[in-house]
Amino acid sequence: MRAIRMHEYGGPEVLRYEEVALPEPGVGEARVKLDAVGVNYIDIYQRRGQYPDSLPVIPGREAAGVVDAVGPGVSDLTPGARVVYAMHVGAYAEYAVVPARRLVPIPDALEVRVAAAVMLQGLTAHYLTHSTYPLQPGDSALIHAAAGGVGLLLVQMAKRRGAWVIGTVSTEQKADLARQAGADEVILYTQADFETETKRLTNGKGVNVVYDSVGQATFDKSLNCLTPRGYLVLYGQSSGPVPPLNPQVLSTKGSLYLTRPNLMHYTLDRAELLERAADLFDWITAGSLTVRIDATFPLEEAPLAHRYLEERKTKGKVLLIP
């Protein structure tokens, strides 16, 4: 089969399109013929070596397709079943072997590309808004990168929970997308200071929660945007890792909370995974959650997809098509 492999860490050029052996499923595993592969910022962290693996490695942690073969001990999946998964390395390929417990059946009413586009980012937005800081009606939230793949889903889910939402974006086009997703206010951080604007929009009170995927460039000001006892939910670091923090800072800024969550810890068992996925699929099929696929690239153009993501051009989900 053909796959993208990394033999070293570095820029997009380390993603090589190669012929590799077709993997065989072991005990409790299934082999999936992939139809669509999600591209996520965690793939860039992996490529840069921030999340190191044993090299060479096939990157990617999200895909959808059809079960091709099952290993011993798999009784609830059969060849031909449409499935989607997230958080298992090896997705940048024509086939992937995945633990059966991580595979989620795709409802008949859902397109396979939509399933691939929503799995990792949708599950992330779900746990952020429902579990990490469970938004309540009347809460206020600041969402960075509000027109990105996670951001657009976050805005929609925050509004479903009854929150008042401020989004930050870089362009007018992205501002329009954030508003279409339901954002009550949008700040163009390229034209205005988001901390100053957030304080103005909240009459100096600040927001209950900041969902921050940017990291280094926004961290300090994100803390300053919070109301006393507010939550900074740092779920990414697209601008780089945050420097060490003296916990006393959280006290002086208002007895704040800081958390750095991970999707794996919010899908600890199969029941939790299926419950979150079922919510996503139900909302999509009912028309109350919109998944925006921004761009698709052939698998061999994975380096271009990474550049597109790193240049912050994305306005929704990016997919690779094997």
Image: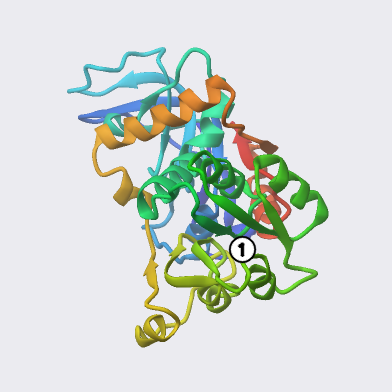
Asked if 227 appears above or below 12 in the picture, the reply is: below
Q: Nearer the viewer, residue 82 or 249?
A: 249
Q: Residue at x 41, y 34 (%)?
A: 85
Q: Is residue 243 visible?
A: yes
Q: Secondary structure at mark 1?
A: loop
Q: Nearer the viewer, residue 219 or 85?
A: 219
Asked if 274 appears above or below 266 in the picture, the reply is: above
Residue that mark 1 sits on: 11
Residue 268 screen position, x and y as percent = 25, 44
Task: Give neighbour class at mark 1: few <14, some 14-19, many 20+ (Cα, 10 Å).
Answer: few
Q: Nearer the viewer, residue 304 or 244?
A: 244
In the rendered view, does 199 fall on the left or right side of 170?
Answer: left
Q: Nearer the viewer, residue 314 or 258?
A: 258
Residue 258 screen position, x and y as percent = 39, 70
Q: Residue at x 50, y 51 (%)?
A: 138
Residue 98 screen position, x and y as percent = 34, 34
Residue 49 screen position, x and y as percent = 47, 65
Q: Residue at x 61, y 63 (%)?
A: 11
User: Looking at the picture, which amino acid does disc 1 mark?
Assistant: Gly
Q: Residue furthest left?
A: 73
Q: Is residue 34 visible?
A: no
Asked if 252 appears above or below 217 in the picture, the reply is: below
